[in-house]
Image: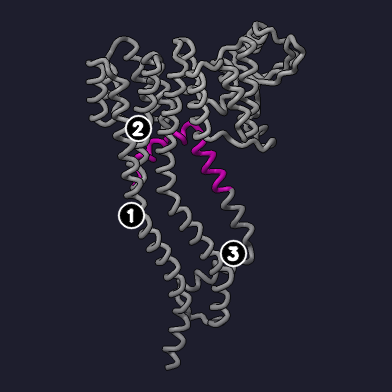
Amino acid sequence: MPIYKYHSVTKLGEDIDGKISGNSEIHAMEKLRKMNYNVLKIQKARFEKLERFIKNEKPVKVGDLSLFSRQLASMIGAGIPVTRAIGTIASQITNKSFRNALETIAKNVESGMSLTDAFGGYPHIFADLYISLIESGELGGMLEEALLRISDQMYKDKKIKDAVTSATFYPKIVLTFAGMILVAMVTFLVPTFQGMTGNNENIPLVTKIIYDFSDSFRAHWYWYIIIIIVVIVIVKSLFGSNKGQKIWDRWKIKIPLMGPINYLTLVARFSRTLSTLLGGGIPVVQALTSSGDTSGNSMVAERVRRATINIEQGNKISSELAAIDVFPNTVIHMINIGEETGQLPELLDRIALFYEDEVETKTKGLSTILEPLMLIGVGIVVGGMLIALYMPIFTAVSTQM
C-alpha cells in the first residue's frame, strides 16, 4: 500500500507531520479527516532513501525493534494504555528517526488512528511481517501476544544473521589486509627490485608481468579505481534487477561452502516466520505468502506463491510445498504431521529451532575451515610474488658464478 506524507493541524492547533498508508491520496485524506485532522498538505512519499541519506538518519536495528516490541508488550500487559506506553518508550530511545516515528505514531493512535495504520506509515522501520502481526493482534484482541511473537521472531532472525556475519568476518578482514599488502608491494617494493635488475631482458616472464603491472598501476592508479567502481556499480545493477536477483538467489544456495549455510538459513527463516504468523492468527495463504517473501530468496518466494494457488482451493499444505521442490523432506514430513494433528505452528517452531542450530554449527565449522585456507592463500600470493621478484637476482648471481 502506498505511503503518503502529510502536514496537518489538530483541533487543539498542534502541528503534526507524519506518514500514513492508503490506497490513494483521497483514501489517506479520509483516514486523517476521521481523526479530526485538518490536512494542510499531503503527497505521496518519494525518494525516501535519498531523503533519509541527506538527513543522515540512522537505520533502526533489528535488536532495537525486538527490544521495543518486548517493552511495549510488557507495558500493555501491565495495563498501561498503548499511546502512553509508546510515548514512554520513545522518550528513552536515542535513535532520533525511530524516536520521532514513535512519537508521531502515539499522537496518531491517540487521535483515533488504528495501530496498523499508524505503524504502516513507516515501512522503512516496520516491515510487512511486523504490520501483519500488529493487525492480527489488534483485531483479535491479542496485541500483547502478537508483540511477544514479533520480538522472539526478530531476536532469532538476528541470531542467524549474526552467526553468518561472524563466519564471513574473518575472510573479509584477511582479504582486505591482503589487498593492502599487494598494493604496498606493487607501489614500493617492486620498483626497488626493478631498479636492482635494470633493463635486463633475460628476466622471467612472470617477473616482467609484475614489473609492467607495477609501472601501469603507479602511472595510472586512478584508472584502476575508476574501473573497480564501475565494475561494482555494474554488478550491483545486474543483481539489483529482478532477473539478476533471481539468478543470484538460485545460485547462492549452491555455491561451495556458503551454499549449504544459505539454504539452511532460508529454511529456518521460512519455518520461523510461518510459525509466528500462523500462531498469531494470520490466514494460511497470507502466512505462506509472507513467509516466502521474507525468506530472503526470490526463487523460494515465487514457488511458494505458486503453491498457495492450489492450497487456497483446499489442497494440503505439505503436498503442495513438496511439489515445488524447495524444502527438505524432513520439513515436509513435519508439516504433514502438523496438519493432521492441528499443531502446525508448534511443529514449525521445532523445525526452525533445529535448522537455526544447524546454521550455528555449520558457520562455526566454516570459520574453522576458512581461517587456514585464507592464510595459505595469502601466503601463496605474497610468497609467489616475492619469489618472482627474486628470480632475476638469483639468475644473475648464478650466471656470474
Which numbered circle lies on residue 268? 2
Residue at mark 1 to residue at mark 3: CA–CA distance: 34 Å
Q: Quadrant of residue 49?
A: top right
Please name the amino acid that badge 3 sits on: Phe
Q: Nearer the viewer, mark 2 or mark 3?
A: 2
Quarter placement of the C terminus: bottom left
Mark 3: few/some/many CA within 10 Å (<14, 14-19, 20+): some
Residue type (three-letter) at the residue carrying disc 1? Ile
Along the viewing direction, whichever of 240 and 399 lies nearer the viewer: 240
Residue at the right extreme, as displayed: 13
Relative to 159, 240 lies left or right:
right
- Judged from the image, the secondary structure of the residue bearing numbered disc 2 is helix
In this picture the colour scheme is one colour
According to the image, label 3 marks what residue?
A: 217
Q: Earlier in the sequence, mark 1 or mark 3?
A: 3
Mark 1 residue element:
helix
Res. 286 image quadrant: top left
Taken as a whole, is the magenta stretch helix, strand or loop?
helix
Between circles 1 and 3, the one closer to the viewer is: 1
**Image point 50% across, 57% down: which residue?**
176
How far apart are labels 2 and 3 at the CA level? 46 Å
Distance Cα–Cα, label 2 vs label 1: 23 Å
Residue plotted at (60% across, 11% down):
113
The numbered disc on residue 369 is: 1
Quadrant, the N terminus: top right
Q: Which residues are magenta?
A: 230-256
Secondary element at tag 3: helix
Q: Is residue 307 left or right of residue 91?
A: left
Residue 18, x across and y down, in percent: 67, 20
Relative to residue 124, is residue 178 depicted above or below? Answer: below
